[in-house]
Amino acid sequence: MTIQSVRLPVVASAVAARPAKATAAAVSGDEVQISGAPTPASAEQLAQQGTAAAEQAATHGAGAGAAALRGPLRMILVGPPGSGKGTQAKIITQFFKATHISTGELLRAEVKQGTELGKEAQTYMQAGKLVPDEIILKMVDGKLAGEESFILDGFPRSKAQAEHLDETLAKLGKPLTAVANLMVDDEIVVKRLKERGRQDDTEEIIRERLQVYHSQTEPVTGHYQLQSLLEPVEAEGQVAQVGYNVITQLNSRLRPQGC
């Protein structure tokens, strides 16, 4: 399935009001800075904008009952650091009412609580290395068992993790809907993360993280492409526009044929 750039509907006034040339420049915590915008917009505001635009597109031509056609969403967000996975997850979560499962947030919670799992994971995180599979898998398996609709962000990060996830979801009877691959050029990632202004966002560290992504995580996309689950998404443009494209593609997968 090929994703094409789609113009945001005029009726989504909050989106249309933004400058035509606005692009996502940096993501920091709950704030997303939009180039050309007079003030930073919160991730929640951007989520509302993207959802409003996608809602119109999703229901267009299907009548008022279109929303009822949506089934449980079980998806993975893949993309390099700085591609906007966390921000897009907020947009998708609002539209599909799915649970956002971020391995980064789960790990930080374990570290904050001082659990044995958190202490073990922290040694790897502080060194800038990937946390070993056995730690991640225990944490994610338990979370997935209690969720019907979910968005996985930051997992799987390797082919071995992807294969384990296949087995776990098969046992739970929860097949994946899609895998959205947020594609951003490396130089744009470097620019975005440097502008974010965090102390550890030096160009050397950013490029090291990108190298780890390309060598260890990017091959995951091929795994899901073979399963016809991959949805490539150009993620260098306006945040709400990217969210609009992702949601309309996901919604088309969840619709029964002919609807």
Image (tube, rainbow, N blue to C red):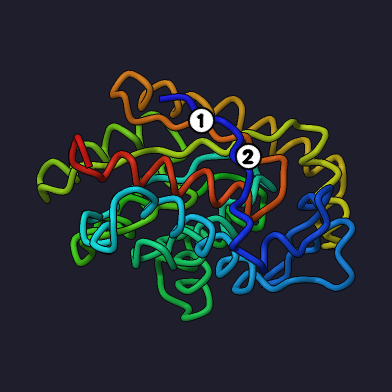
Q: Could you tell which of marks 2 and 1 lies nearer the N-terminus?
A: 1
Which residue is under mark 1? 3
User: Where residue 224 sits in the image (x, y, percent)?
Assistant: 36, 27
Q: Is residue 46 left or right of residue 166?
A: right
- The numbered mark at residue 22 is none
Q: Where's the N terminus, which quadrant?
A: top left
Quarter the C terminus occupies: top left
Whole-percent x and y of residue 106? 44, 66
Q: Residue at x 67, y 68 (%)?
A: 14
Q: Quadrant of residue 165?
A: top left
Q: Secondary structure at mark 2?
A: loop
Q: How many marks?
A: 2
Q: Is residue 186 above or below residue 91?
A: above
Crowd class of label 2 (few under 14; some 14 to 19; many from 20; radius 10 Å): many
- Residue 42 placement: quadrant: bottom right
Left or right of residue 178, residue 166 in this image: left
Q: Name the secondary structure under disc 1.
A: loop
